[in-house]
Image (spheres, coloured by chain):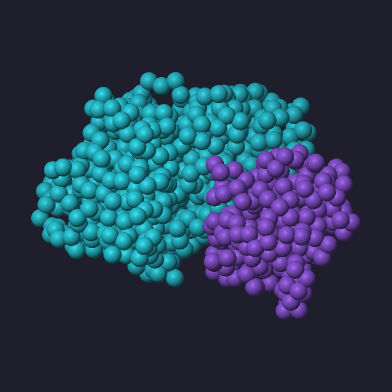
Amino acid sequence: MSIDTVQHAIDDPDHEQPYPELGLKPDEYQRIRDILGRRPTSSELAMYSVMWSEHCSYKSSKVHLRQFGEKKPETDALLVGIGENAGVVDIGEGWAVTFKVESHNHPSYVEPYQGAATGVGGIVRDILSMGARPLAVMDPLRFGPLDAPDTRRVLPGIVAGVGGYGNCLGLPNIGGEVVFDETYLGNPLVNALCVGAMRHEDIHLASAKGVGNLVVLYGARTGGDGIGGVSVLASETFDEGGPTKRPSVQVGDPFMEKLLIEATLEVLHSGLVEGIQDLGGAGISCATSELASNGEGGMHVWLDRVLLRDPTLSPEEILMSESQERMCAIVKPENLAAFEALCTKWDVEAIVIGEVNDSGRLTVDWHGERIVDVPPRTVAHEGPVYERPYHRPAWQDTLQGDAPSGLARPTSPEELRSTLIDLVGSPNLASKSWVTSQYDRYVLGNTVLAQPEDVGMVRVDEETGLGVAISTDCNGRFAKLDPYAGAQLALAESYRNVAASGAVPLAVTNCLNFGSPEDPEVMWQFAEATRGLADGCLALGIPVTGGNVSFYNQTGDTAILPTPVVGVLGVIDDVDRRTPMVWGPDGELIYLLGDTRDEFGGSEWAHHVHGHLGGLPPAVDLDRERLLGEILVAGSRDGMLTAAHDVSDGGVAQALVEMALRSGVGARFWAPEGLDAFTFLFSESAGRAIVVVPRSEELRFTEMCAARQLPAHRIGVVDSGLAADAGFEPGTQVLQYTDVFTVPLSELREVHERTLPEALA
Amino acid sequence: MRIGVVTFPGTLDDQDASRAVRVAGAEAVTLWHGDDDLKSVDAVVLPGGFSYGDYLRCGAISRFAPVMRALVDAANGGLPVLGICNGFQILCESHLLPGALTRNDSLHFVCRDQRLRIEDTTSMWTRDYAPGQEIVIPLKNGEGCFVANETTLDELEGEGRVIARYVDVNPNGSRRDIAGIRNARGNVVGLMPHPEHAVEPLTGPSTDGLGFFTSVLNSLVSAS
């Protein structure tokens, strides 16, 4: 096999290179030639092509993502900002947490199990590479219609992959989302979030500092899996009849990842590591160029030293391989023996593949021949940046003009009751326990709240009870109707969920899932959503700490709903004080906080009952969200609340049903004055929550709301003794809308829980 | 009292088992798979997880670990041993307990709050429960279906060696709803559900699991 060396590239400058097949545009290829002053070698071409892919370089999104930094609110909490593997937030008492959400959409469509599994593995290594012990994972998932044949293909595989990897890795899966919409048919969204914690002094960064320090590759051996996975899979859409891309998907080994976690934490805590980077997309190309670029600026790599699973791999393939469960550490020569000993303890292989220098070049040799000689910044950080053209779609006005006001609404008690039953069992509102019961939520013994609660909450410090809560949310239909408002509504919902649990919202991560950036209308959705999210974070005073963009989520010309998934992290001083969804004994009072308006654009009711999407999403009032959040947190801190639950998809009706089912105890309720039954039950106005207040705290709580001018309506009371009057067997627990209808919890539970098992059996 | 908790490569619930030991009032002692020194502990917990990635067969590789050589001898000599989930699988592979754990009949991993009935309170790990007492503790496994031939099952039943049975739902297809068994002597117990995840009201569905850990402490006290 002849190797394309630097010398060869100089000697044979006109050699034709297959850059289009690697996803590079002619001007991008020319730029590489300009940077190098010659044609790239095939290894250099491989590195640039994968690092300059959309997935790695953010070339289409960068100009918009800058807003997250430019509009960053004043905060002391941010210890490490955007740009590192994951942002780091101070949660007090010397603790810091890091969290991030990433997409693994395209691999999961091609190979559901492995695509989803390696999505979990990748985000866990991102968290680990900051020096944090991973604490928990969450998985926002989106699929085509529940009854579509392809959903039956991808959903079970994706769920099994998420569970198979996370369960074996020993991280509790504490929440996420499962959403169905026809636009995700052919483009399922698999987003994976991980949160980790560390002491402040344990924060590590991806930089190769210290001339003479060694570059150690450790973990799994490098194989042929995932070669070009990032650039090939993430940068092209799925067209019918295209060639099969199965070999590009990576294969995960969670057992190796578990060993890698323990070995990594032990070498970090032993002070043996100067800098660290995980190997994910773009493998060794990414790790070496980023480490060098962030450090002294130079690095030399002996590529033939890399331990291989497949000895026939070419140097180009080794550079691009996305084999999982690998990490790269910068280690002082005098610490190498101790580093290797700890790797041996955990049965992890380690090999020195390079050395840090100050040459300003990343050089790679293959059996003594120079095959790469590049300025590392041009690979890692100075890729192309595109100002993609964008414009508001012509159909946007028509869409917004198609208000749901003309849709037939239920009016009679019977119609209202059957609408409620119908929605409770609809795919998006039905119980997701078919999915979540395949995930271990108990491992590590620190899970305080997990789905179907509003948030996942884990204890960070067993001594003090310090903990964190996370929620991920997005209603893509709202974002389709108005991407700016839709992104803010996703943020607001996530913020509200965190506050409802009693935690103080602190920081934001996001996973921006969109169609093709080469479509100006999709690009407009992206630009608007990004602007909305940045403005929203500024208004709520919580910074974006990092995130991920996934473009090209479309089949043919049909893009997915714009889906800016937002994750908000909050901190709670003592997890013992959390506010769950479960209400207390008879007599406790149910309050609806916030204003309910006639808002049905993008609602679950319009979607499920009428198949309608049009009009405007609910109005956004971030000042109100902030006030509501403060009240919810104060209510928790001062012991005024037994339970709280965010009101969003499906409205007050769905929120009450979920609380009643979780509690197993009935309640009666009524509408606030001046509100018609339908709007009360099903409107999806933002800025609302249901709280449950013991009678002894009622006055204190309502006075607090009045003083802060937050509308608080008493809409019900917990009551386990309604059965007899309503004509049911004594002891039957029912939810009763006074003078309108009564539904036994057993009926609601059956409807709520049967939908997914029946569809996926 | 000192109770050892073994860590194999891929063990996941070791920190939880150690916490449960401490909550019960004993000292938790870390034992390493590659070390055949049991550090003079008074009892041992083999915690849950995916030791060696469940490769080959659950527990099949771990049984050859140096620590298991020492543990099998000690268990045959009367040392109390509790195997939870993957630990139960390792005990079966080590022939300290009969039968085997196979793939759930649903073919899915299942995590749920599981109701059990304590059937035998003579073992060193169940004496603090009342006979027939029902408890709710987490269950989480992919390969928790207990199987054995009919003769063995009849023997287990006849000798009162079924220590716990699934109630309401059999979550994995286990023969005769068996959730846990013991050896003839009563010092070695294998249990598929996870009592160590039910020792704190904050993080568990109950504190019903604590009884396993207090039982062994009381057994040891009354034996000494």
Foreground residue, B95 or A420? A420
> Exactly how many numbered labels are in the figure?
0
Q: Picture coordinates of residue A451 (x, y %)?
A: 45, 49
Give the residue at the far bottom of this rendering. B150
- Residue A9 percent location from the top left of the image: 54, 41
- Residue A430: x percent and y percent? 36, 59
Name the side, left or right, on which A99 lies relative to A131: left
Using the image as rendered, state which of residue A205 and residue B160 is in the foreground.
B160
Residue at the spot 82% in from the left edge and 65% down from the top edge: B184
Question: In this picture, is A214 found above or below A161?
Answer: above
Q: Nearer the viewer, residue A760 or A269?
A: A760
Q: In the figure, the cyan chain has which letter? A: A
Q: Is A726 on the left-hand or right-hand side of A115? A: left
Q: Depth check: A591 or A291 in front?
A: A591
Q: Is residue A540 left or right of residue A282?
A: left
Among the chains pictured, the one given purple colouring is: B
| Residue A380 visible in the shown view | no
The answer to whether residue A571 is left or right of residue B6 is left
Residue at x 66% of width, y 38% of height: A264
Position of the N terminus of chain A by quadrant: bottom right
Q: Position of residue A717 (x, y in %)?
A: 31, 46
Q: Residue at x 71, y 48 (%)?
A: B213
User: Which quadrant of the figure contains the C terminus of chain A?
Assistant: bottom left
Q: Which of the 4 image quadrants contains residue B108?
A: bottom right
Give the residue at x 47% y 31%: A572
Judge whether residue B189 can be spotted in this image: yes
